[in-house]
Amino acid sequence: MDKEKIVRENVFRESEETKGIAVRGYDFDDGVDWEKIIESYRSTGAQATNLSTAISIVNKMISEKAFIFLGYTSSMVSSGLRDVFRYLVKHKKINVAVTTAGGIEEDIIKCLGDFVIGDFRADGGELRGKGINRIGNIFAANNRYIEFEKFVQQILQEMLDEKEIWTPSEIIWKLGEKINDESSICYWAFKNKIKIYCPAITDGAFGDNVYFFRLQGKDLKIDIARDAEEFNNTTIGLAKSGLIILGTGIVKHSILNANMLRNGADYAVYVNTASEYDGSDAGALPSEAVSWGKIKENAESVKVFADATIVFPLIVAESFAKN
């Protein structure tokens, strides 16, 4: 047996030449050109290339005049991404949004006082003693929630005086109207009549306020079913549907499920860090959504495994803000 021959045949096996974009990074000998740095992501590989693909898909959504669904989780509104979302809603860059309870209440709360940068490793017990709530490395003083209660309780009474049953999206417009603050996403949603849907609106400080309100015997009702019907109906008859989903959970699934009713979206961009090993929808790739008819088989889609606080401003800069 010729060991050398066997080893060489295995190690130095002849291959086919593959065609495609040559892997190249940005050359800093050319100085610092931010636009070209982002352009270089296309040929960098790994998540940089996925980010470049996401930018391309979003630009196609815009050029094709797709109906754009934007989904984001509450922690993103806790962060500075709130200002990015506000820009998109203010300038009517998206058609509808879906978020969680924190994505509504913290938008309003920030009109009443700032959150500040803290520390991921801050001692929880020490913070509790000081009345400081931690959201990752963001600190939210509990006084903000006390002010929020004063603001919301009065509005809940006004709502009940007007009618007994409200949908979450109606409540969100009401909050935006009453806060009357141009830094607020909800304010611009109300002003521009862009619906923000929140399927789990009671899962947070707003829900606590509804609880306290009802403890007083005040029978305010929230009609989630009517919002679900209205939201699902937005997908029917669309010429083109585009999804931008930041994060996971109920936000991601609500948007995908609604698009299943039209046999799938035409464009989809996911940004999250979840993996699919446990079979959850959170970590599922776009290809899984194709199997359900939530994204079309021939759709352009990509998942960027990244922190949305880092990459979403880059996506917006290279798409919505340019257009």
Image (tube, rainbow, N blue to C red):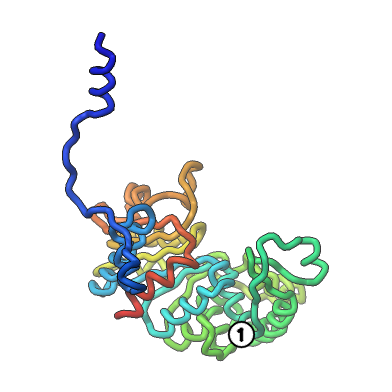
Examine the rendered structure and indicate whether residue 136 appears above or below residue 22: below
Q: Residue furthest right?
A: 129
Pinpoint residue 262: horizontal percent, then vertical percent: 30, 61
Local SS, label 1: helix
Along the line of sight, the residue nearer the viewer: 263 or 322: 322
- The quadrant the C terminus occupies is bottom left
Q: What residue is disc 1 on? A: 111
Q: Residue at x 23, y 53 (%)?
A: 22
Pinpoint residue 24: horizontal percent, then vertical percent: 28, 57
Pinpoint residue 26: horizontal percent, then vertical percent: 32, 63
State left or right for residue 181 relative to residue 28.
Answer: right
Examine the rendered structure and indicate whether residue 29 appears above or below residue 317: above
Q: Residue at x 25, y 69 (%)?
A: 60
Q: Amino acid at mark 1?
A: Cys
Q: Residue at x 35, y 67 (%)?
A: 28
Along the line of sight, the residue nearer the viewer: 289 or 225: 289
Q: Residues within 10 Å of mark 1 (few under 14, many from 20)?
A: some
- The answer to which quarter of the image holds residue 254 is bottom left
Along the line of sight, the residue nearer the viewer: 127 or 259: 127
- The answer to which quarter of the image holds residue 115 is bottom right
Pinpoint residue 295: horizontal percent, then vertical percent: 32, 56
Whether residue 230 is visible to the viewer of this picture, yes or no, is: no
Q: Residue at x 64, y 66 (%)?
A: 137
- The quadrant the N terminus occupies is top left
Image label count:
1
State left or right for residue 56 relative to residue 178.
Answer: left
Whether residue 110 is visible to the viewer of this picture, yes or no, is: yes
- The answer to which quarter of the image holds residue 181 is bottom right
